[in-house]
Image (cartoon, coloured by chain):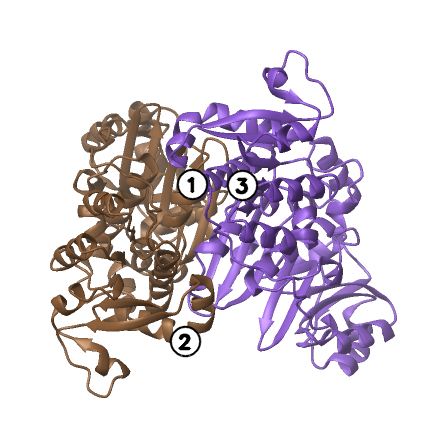
Chain colours: A brown, B purple
C-alpha cells in the first residue's frame, strides 16, 4: 500500500481522485502496489462529496505524516505550490505535478532536490495534457541529439484557429464560441497571447537540451492579430495557420519562439485541429516523430498525473528523471533566425508588384476570394531582422505570418 | 562502464554501432554510464570495417564473459535468436531486441525469466521502428484501461497504398516502385499479406491487455487485392485506404484484425502517408492519443534499440517491464464484429439498385470517374458474418473493404 495526498480539489484534482477510483484495479497492477488517497488538501469544504472524510485544510498534516510517500500538486500557480512541493521533497516525499508555471520557473531546483534525495519530481501533465511527452523525452528518445521540438501546445488557440478556418470567422467571434463552450477562460490572455504555450516549450526545451531555458526570454506572439483574411489567404495557398511553440538547435545556436505559423499540408502538424495538441520532435537519428492527443481537459490531464503516480510508486527510492541543469541556456536572438514570411498588403497585385519586387525579389502574388483591394505574397528565406526592417519600411502592410 | 554485445551486424546491427559511436556523449549522459560495445557477433567477416577487432563468430565468447551486461539481439528470425536470448537472460544479462517474430512467439517466457532474475527484456524496436510505443504503453499510459490500439504498422504497404492513391497506379506497379526504392523486399509476402503487421499488433495487444495474444489467431488480410478502382472510389468518398492492424476491447470481448480499411478524413490516421507509421491508442480516461514517425529504416530502428540499451543500463538490476502473462487471451471471432463495408459491384447503380437495397436497405450509390459499368455503395453497420453471407450471395461483386 502506498499512501498519497492530493493538493487541490479543483478540476484536475477531482479528476485525479476519479481516475484512481475508476481504474483502481489496473492502476494497482501497473504500479505493483495498492495506491490509496489518504488526504485531499483544499481550503474549501465539500459537504456530501466522497472526499469529505479525507479532506484537510492544513498542509502540515500531510507534510508531517510519514505514511504519505507521494504528493500530487494540482493547485496551479507558483505559490503556495512551490513552498508545498519543496517542503514535500525535503521531507522525503516524491511529487507529481500538472503545474507548468511551477515547473518552468523552479524545475531545475526541484529536480535537483529530488535527485539528491533519491526521490522523483514528475510533471508529465504540465505539457500536452494526456499526451505522453515528458516521459518519452526522458526515457525513449535517449539515443538521439534532439534537433527540434515544435508543438501545438495550447488547445484554446488551436480551437479558435480551427473555427476561423472552418467557418470563415473573425478572431473575436471564434473566441466567443470557445468561451461559451468552456474551451477558453473569461480572461483568455494567457492562452491567446501565447503565454501558456511559452511556458510549455520552455519545459520541453530544457529537458531536450539539458540546460534551463528561461521562459521570459522566449519571443512570444499570440493569435489575437490573426484575421479571417489571413486564414483565407493561407487556405488559398494550401496552408493551415497554427500557433506553434518551437525550439531548434542549429550547431551551437538555440532558437525558441511562440508565434502563429503557416503550416504546409505535408507537415504532420497540418492536420491537428480543434482542441487537440501535438508535439513534433526531430532527432539526429530517429528522424521525425509526433505525439498527438488531448492537450487539456479534466480527465486526460488527470490520466497523465496518475501515470506519474504509478511511476513514482514503482520507483519510490530511485530517481528516474534526467538531469536538467540550472545553468541557463543562452538563446540566440530571434533576429538571426532565417525563414520565409507571408505578407498581406493593401492594394492589388499590379499596384504592389514593383515596390514589393524591389524589396523581396521575384515573388508571386496571391489574391483570396472575398478580400478585395489587397493581395499577399511569400518572401524568399531571409533573417527575421532583414525581413522586419523591410516590412516596417513598406507602406500599406496589413499583416505578416511566418512560414514553417 | 557498461559492456554490451551486439548479435548480428546486418542493417540494424550496423545502425546500432553507428548510433552509439555518433551520439556517445549524449547517450552516456542519458545512461549515467559509459556504454562500450565489447563484441559484435556475426558469422561473416568484415575486413577493414571498424568492428573487425571486436567481431566474434562464437556466441559462447559473449555468453561466458561476465563483463557483458547487456546483449543486443538484432539478427531477426526465431532461431538461433531465441536460444541466444534465453541463454543470455539465464546468464544474468539483460537483452534488447528489434525482433518482432521472437517477441510475438516467446515474449511471455522471456519477460518472465527477466522478471525472475531482476533483469530486463526490452523490445521497443520490434514495433513502429523509431516511434516510441512499447515504453509509452508500459510506463506512460498506465492510468487507463486501454480500449483500442489501431496502427499503420507496416511502412511498405503504406508506401504502396500512398503511391496508388497519389498516382492512380495498380498494386503491381506500385509494388515494383517500392521494390526499386528498397522499401519492399524481393519476396514481399510478409509485408503485403499483412503478416508483419499481424505480429506487431499481437505484441501491442498482449502488452495492452496483459495476456498473450497469439498472432496465429489474428484474422489477417493483406493489400494485394486492392485495386486502383477501390482507391478511386475511396478518394471520391473522401476516404483513404490504409492497411490497419487493430485490436479492441468491448466489455469482455477482445477483437484483433489486420486488413485494409477506409479511413475517414476526421481520423488522425488518415493523413499518415508514405513509409510513415502511426499508432492510435484509445484509453478510458486519456481519450485518443497517436504516435507517429518512421516505422522502419536502419537508423530509426537502431535509435529505438539504443534507447532500450540506455534504459537497460539505467536499470541494470531492476526489472521495469510490465508483466504480460503466458495465459492466452481468447479473441472473439471476427464474425461477431460489427462495422460498415464498402462494396463495388459490376453494372450501373440503376441496374443494381433493387438487388442491393433488398439486401442492405436504402444505401446510396457512388460512381468513380474512369471506372465505367460498375458502382459502389457503403452498407449500414452489420456483423461480419451477416455481411459476408450477403456479399457472397450477391452476383457481380468486385471487392469489399471495411470502414474504420
Q: Residues within 10 Å of mark 1 (few under 14, many from 20)?
A: some
Query: Which residue corresponds to the image point at 36% horizontal and 49% vertical from the top-left?
Result: A134
Q: Which residue is mark 2?
A: A22
Label 1 vs label 2: CA separation?
33 Å
> Looking at the rendered structure, which numbered label has been put on residue B314?
1
Q: Chain of mark 3?
A: B
Number of numbered markers: 3
Disc 1 chain ID: B
Subunit ID for the residue under disc 2 = A
- The percent position of residue B55, horizontal first and vertical second, equals 64, 21
* Above-or-below relation of A33 to B321: below
- Give the number of the disc on residue A107: none
Give how far across and how far down residue B3 sits, in percent.
51, 29
Tell which tag, 1 or 2, sits nearer the viewer: 1
Q: Secondary structure at mark 2?
A: helix
User: Which mark sits nearer the N-terminus, 1 or 3?
Assistant: 3
> SS for tag 1?
helix
Q: In the image, which is nearer the foreground, mark 1 or mark 3?
A: 1
Q: Is residue A321 left or right of residue B275?
A: left
Asked if badges 3 and 2 are on one and the same chain, I answer no
* The furthest residue to the bottom: A48
Residue B114, how many percent across, how many down?
56, 49
A53 vs A69, nearest the viewer: A69
Q: Are marks 1 and 2 in contact (CB under 8 Å)?
A: no
Q: Secondary structure at mark 3?
A: loop
Query: Which is in the foreground here, disc 3 or disc 2?
Result: 2
Q: CA distance from mark 3 to mark 2?
A: 33 Å
- Which residue bears the numbered disc 3? B130
Q: Position of residue B398 (x, y in %)?
A: 82, 62
Amino acid at each position: 500500500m502506498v499512501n498519497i495526498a492530493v493538493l487541490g480539489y479543483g478540476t484536475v484534482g477531482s479528476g485525479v481522485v476519479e481516475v484512481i477510483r475508476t481504474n483502481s484495479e489496473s492502476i494497482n497492477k501497473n504500479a505493483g502496489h495498492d495506491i490509496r488517497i489518504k488526504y485531499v488538501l483544499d481550503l474549501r469544504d465539500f459537504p456530501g462529496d466522497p472526499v469529505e472524510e479525507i479532506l484537510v485544510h492544513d498542509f502540515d498534516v500531510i507534510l508531517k505524516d510519514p505514511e504519505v510517500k507521494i504528493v500530487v500538486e494540482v493547485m496551479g500557480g507558483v505559490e503556495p505550490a512551490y513552498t508545498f512541493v519543496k517542503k514535500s521533497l525535503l521531507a522525503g516525499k516524491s511529487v507529481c505535478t500538472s503545474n507548468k508555471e511551477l515547473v518552468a520557473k523552479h524545475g531545475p531546483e526541484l529536480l535537483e532536490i529530488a535527485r539528491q534525495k533519491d526521490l522523483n519530481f514528475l510533471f508529465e501533465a504540465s505539457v500536452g495534457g494526456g499526451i505522453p511527452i515528458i516521459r518519452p523525452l526522458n526515457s525513449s528518445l535517449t539515443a538521439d541529439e534532439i534537433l527540434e521540438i515544435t508543438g501545438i501546445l495550447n488547445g484554446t488557440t488551436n480551437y479558435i484557429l480551427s473555427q476561423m478556418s472552418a467557418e470563415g470567422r473573425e478572431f473575436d467571434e471564434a473566441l466567443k464560441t470557445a468561451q461559451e463552450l468552456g474551451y477558453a477562460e473569461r480572461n483568455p490572455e494567457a492562452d491567446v497571447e501565447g503565454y501558456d504555450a511559452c511556458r510549455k516549450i520552455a519545459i520541453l526545451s530544457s529537458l531536450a537540451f539539458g540546460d534551463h531555458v528561461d521562459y521570459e526570454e522566449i519571443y512570444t506572439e499570440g493569435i489575437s492579430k490573426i484575421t479571417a483574411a489571413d486564414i483565407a489567404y493561407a487556405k488559398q495557398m494550401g496552408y493551415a495557420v497554427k500557433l506553434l511553440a518551437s525550439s531548434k538547435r542549429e550547431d551551437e545556436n538555440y532558437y525558441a519562439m511562440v508565434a502563429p505559423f503557416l503550416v504546409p499540408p505535408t507537415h504532420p502538424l497540418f492536420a491537428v485541429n480543434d482542441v487537440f495538441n501535438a508535439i513534433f520532435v526531430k532527432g539526429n537519428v530517429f528522424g521525425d516523430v509526433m505525439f498527438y492527443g488531448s492537450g487539456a481537459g479534466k480527465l486526460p490531464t488527470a490520466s497523465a498525473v496518475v501515470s506519474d503516480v504509478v511511476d513514482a510508486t514503482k520507483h519510490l527510492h530511485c530517481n528516474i528523471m534526467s538531469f536538467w541543469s540550472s545553468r541557463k541556456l543562452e538563446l540566440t536572438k530571434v533576429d538571426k533566425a532565417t525563414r520565409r514570411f507571408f505578407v498581406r498588403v493593401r492594394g492589388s497585385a499590379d499596384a504592389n508588384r514593383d515596390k514589393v519586387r524591389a524589396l523581396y525579389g521575384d515573388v508571386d502574388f496571391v489574391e483570396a476570394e472575398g478580400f478585395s483591394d489587397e493581395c499577399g505574397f511569400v518572401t524568399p528565406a531571409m533573417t527575421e531582422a532583414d525581413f522586419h526592417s523591410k516590412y516596417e519600411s513598406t507602406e500599406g502592410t496589413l499583416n505578416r505570418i511566418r512560414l514553417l
